[in-house]
Amino acid sequence: MTIALDIDGTITGMDHLIPDCVASYFQELYRQGWQFVFLTGRTFSFAQVTLNKLGFPYLLALNNGADLLEMPQKKGVCHAYLDYTIIPILDELYRGYENYFVVYEGYKRGNCAYFRSDRFSAEMSDYFKEVQALSTEVWKGVDSFEIFSHSTFPLVKCIGSQEMLEGFDQKLRTLKGIATAVIADPISCRYHLMLITHVEANKGRAIRTFVRRFLLGSPLIAGGNDNNDIPLLKEGDIRIAMDGSPEDLRKLANILAPPADKMGIIDGLREAIKQT
């Protein structure tokens, strides 16, 4: 019996932490024999702060499925990383757009987020400070991304309006070897995010890998709240979408749960377990 859940906007409150009652309910389900998988578009440092209330083993997918870990050992299961050659291509395609993108290192390399400080507005710099305050993630301004020229990395994140990012996403559809997802920014209602990963890095592939490697039992209950959770819900036997989720996600769901700030995942899981 397996429960696979997104983190931001699915199990967290307004402070981006798991409420005590949600953590206690997860603990009760674990004692009943449910296995847990958590999947996020964020880095290890963010997930570690968010999930530190959990006192049981779980599996964790980071960077939208680019890094898979066994917790609490922090043992790597597998990863799917982008090659540096994507950066000059993105740089060329980004011409004419406001602001720029952020490149993330994997958890084994320090969870650093690198950005071109000369390409972002003062308003965006203030936003970066908001993000940094939520985890131990290190943000570094650089003059260029040449530091990645001989390495790979898990994630590129573009920040902007929904309209701008959806337009940019159309440009990227011609590129091979990558996957993209445009989602609402869980930290600021001013922005949307586009996550760019290796084509084999998404939450659906992540849960399939975990099921195969760890012989996870069925039924599989899957829950999420945004577009990057669509591949995850497609893998579920019972599918939970949080209230306020995009229409494409809600169409996949068997259960529409109350929003995360009302601890709706508890109601969603209770209903899902009734259906098993």
Image (tube, rainbow, N blue to C red):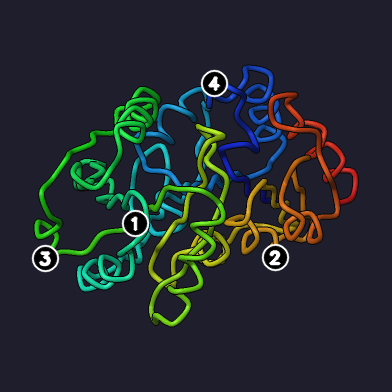
Of mark 4 and mark 2, the one earlier in the sequence is: 4
Asked if the residues shown at circle 3 and circle 4 are in contact, with their CB atoms under 8 angstroms apart, the answer is: no
Mark 1 or mark 4: which comes first in sequence? 4
Q: Is mark 3 on a helix, strand or loop?
A: loop
- Disc nearer the start of the sequence (2/3): 3
Q: What amino acid type is highlighted by mark number 1?
A: Val
- Residue name at image x 59 percent, y 45 percent: 6
* Helix, strand or loop for disc 1: strand
Q: Please, what is the three-letter code of the amino acid marked with disc 4?
A: Asp
- Marks 4/2: CA–CA distance: 29 Å
Circle 2/circle 3 CB separation < 8 Å: no
Determine which of the numbered discs, if any, sits on residue 156 in the image.
1
Query: Which residue matches tag 2?
Result: 234
Residue 15 image label: 4
Choose the circle earlier in sequence order: 2 or 1.
1
Front residue of 63 and 238: 63
Taking the spot 26% from the left edge, 59% from the top edge, the residue there is 153
Q: Estimate the spatial distance between the alpha carbons at disc 1 and disc 3, rounded to whole Å.
A: 15 Å
**Residue shown at 37% from the left, 58% from the top:** 97
Residue 149 numbered mark, or none: 3
Q: How crowded is mark 4: few (under 14 residues within 10 Å), some or many (20 or more)?
A: few
Amino acid type at image mark 2 = Lys
Q: Is residue 116 left or right of residue 40?
A: left
Q: Where is residue 232 in the image (x, y as percent from the top left)?
A: 63, 59
| Distance from the alpha carbon under mark 1 to that under mark 4 | 24 Å
Q: Is residue 266 left or right of residue 61?
A: right
Disc 2 secondary structure class: helix
